[in-house]
Image: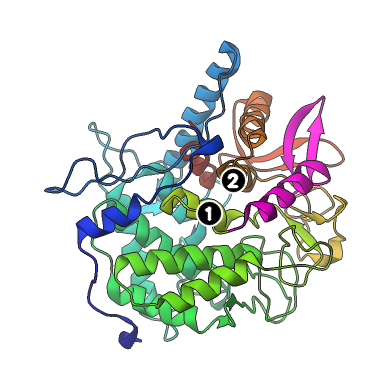
């Protein structure tokens, strides 16, 4: 796999210039937030600041609630950094910097003690700590060296054992590349050896531009973050395909030679994925009949990192309108969220389409509402000039926070609204999306 790795082809100055590619701001409003990347010795203006959704002027009480909610989202992220042995929070020093040691651990929540590749990406992208990124990448990359195919572990067990079930064929390797890109954006030197291994693994999953997974061949589950959903393999999941497009761009910018043709092929495959119900609405998977609130994540991350969408306006508009219609849950005119997986008409899937006991209709991955994916769907829509998306994002954050002054792994949408499992770490990333 070393043949995949060439020398770094971009200077830091060139990397920065690529990162400032423009986007018609539209509904995103003005850029906001502190710079996340600045190269010593280069122009101070060459900084990369992600786009944020401008949610408009809010009444004073709601503005205060939104600010409190953003503060709580970051608190949740910090709460996910713990001592591995005790589970107690690992706190930054007096200067606000983390100084990790060999017991520092990133976990999704109190409910899940292990460290997951996907959750660690979202949490650390929110916290913006280079030292925590350094610690996490060393753990995952050290483990990757033991995998002949270059796969990055889905899960690192808190007891440091290595059962086979930690290595599902899902998006974990893609997420590790994005975590490395976060590290590079903060001034770190990318691990080209690990990236070459990851690219070799990723290449082996691309079929005619589509990223194909097998998940767990026995159950049909574990293709992606909605890991309880069953689908025969190979499967081209739209969420994974969008991530592939972002990852290929990130690899290119970090110095891995991937070729413009492969990027174009993957992007065309993402932009033209269709299901069985509608030629414009983005499906959960190629040829499938399920609606998935995470189908626009790749488009959202491309806007966030590179200032450019991946999908045509018409496809995002059609997907957004269907999600807001049949896919959305309201209570007393308040937007609760999207049913994360559902039929195209908004009805819940059969529990037989999932493994495990949690996916009753309206619960967990069978139509529960997941804040992170709601927010990324709305962020993508805002990036395509859909003004209503900003207002719905504000409603989504406020409605959950006002119920209990907390955020959760998911919200049950049937037979009644109930927020489940407090303080789920990846929600911290939502704080990066709104101005």
Tell me which residue sits at (73%, 65%) in the image: 229
User: Which quadrant of the view contains residue 265?
Assistant: bottom right
Looking at the image, is 361 positioned above or below residue 71?
A: below
Rendered location of residue 212, percent (x, y)? 61, 78
Q: Range of the magenta residues?
A: 311-339
Label located before the other in sequence (2 or 1): 1
Q: Does dot 2 land on a helix, a strand or a loop?
A: loop
Q: Which residue is mark 1?
A: 309
Quadrant, the N terminus: bottom left
Q: Is residue 137 left or right of residue 267?
A: left
Tell me which residue sits at (45%, 34%) in the image: 75
Q: Is residue 62 left or right of residue 274?
A: left
Rendered location of residue 238, percent (x, y)? 65, 65
Count of numbered tags: 2
Mark 2 surroundings within 10 Å by alpha-carbon count, few (fewer than 14), some (14 through 19), many (20 or more): many
Rendered location of residue 257, percent (x, y)? 34, 77
Mark 1 surroundings within 10 Å by alpha-carbon count, few (fewer than 14), some (14 through 19), many (20 or more): many
Tell me the CA gap for discs 2 and 1: 8 Å
Q: Tell whether position 328 is magenta.
A: yes
Q: Does dot 1 land on a helix, a strand or a loop?
A: loop
Q: Is residue 355 left or right of residue 155?
A: right
Viewer-proximal residue among 404 and 261: 261
Q: Which residue is mark 2?
A: 384
Q: Is residue 32 visible?
A: yes
Tell me which residue sits at (42%, 77%) in the image: 199
């Amino acid at each position: 796999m070393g043949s995949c790795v060439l020398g770094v082809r971009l200077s830091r100055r060139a990397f920065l210039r690529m990162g400032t590619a423009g986007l018609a701001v539209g509904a995103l409003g003005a850029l906001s937030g502190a710079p996340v990347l600045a190269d010593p010795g280069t122009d101070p203006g060459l900084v990369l600041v992600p786009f944020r959704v401008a949610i408009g002027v809010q009444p004073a009480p709601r503005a205060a609630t939104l600010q409190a909610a953003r503060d709580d989202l970051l608190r949740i992220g910090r709460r996910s950094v713990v001592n591995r042995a005790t589970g107690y929070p690992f706190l930054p020093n007096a200067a606000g910097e983390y100084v990790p040691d060999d017991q520092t651990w990133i976990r999704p929540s109190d409910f899940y003690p292990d460290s997951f590749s996907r959750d660690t990406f979202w949490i650390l992208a929110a916290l913006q700590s280079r030292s925590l990124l350094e610690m996490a990448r060393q753990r995952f990359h050290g483990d990757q060296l033991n995998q002949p195919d270059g796969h990055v572990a889905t899960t690192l067990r808190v007891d440091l054992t290595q059962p086979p079930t930690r290595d599902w064929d899902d998006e974990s390797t893609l997420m590790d590349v994005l975590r490395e890109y976060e590290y590079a954006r903060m001034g770190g030197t990318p691990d080209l050896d690990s990236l070459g291994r990851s690219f070799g693994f990723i290449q082996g999953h691309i079929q005619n531009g589509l990223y194909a997974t097998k998940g767990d061949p026995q159950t049909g589950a574990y293709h992606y973050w909605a890991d309880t959903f069953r689908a025969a393999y190979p499967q081209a999941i739209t969420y994974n395909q969008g991530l592939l497009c972002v990852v290929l761009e990130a690899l290119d910018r970090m110095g891995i030679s991937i070729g413009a043709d492969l990027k174009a092929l993957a992007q065309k495959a993402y932009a033209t994925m269709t299901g069985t119900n509608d030629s414009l609405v983005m499906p959960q998977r190629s040829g499938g009949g399920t609606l998935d609130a995470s189908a626009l994540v790749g488009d959202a991350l491309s806007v966030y990192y590179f200032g450019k969408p991946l999908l045509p306006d018409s496809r995002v508009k059609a997907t957004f309108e269907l999600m807001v219609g049949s896919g959305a849950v309201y209570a007393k005119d308040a937007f609760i969220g999207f049913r994360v997986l559902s039929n195209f008409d908004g009805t819940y899937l059969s529990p037989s389409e999932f493994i495990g006991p949690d996916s009753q209709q309206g619960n967990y991955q069978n139509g529960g509402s997941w804040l992170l994916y709601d927010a990324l769907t709305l962020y993508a829509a805002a990036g395509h000039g859909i003004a209503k998306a900003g207002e719905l994002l504000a409603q989504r954050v406020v409605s959950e926070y006002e119920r209990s002054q907390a955020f959760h792994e998911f919200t049950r949408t049937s037979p009644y609204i109930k927020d489940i499992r407090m303080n789920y770490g990846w929600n911290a990333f939502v704080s990066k999306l709104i101005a």
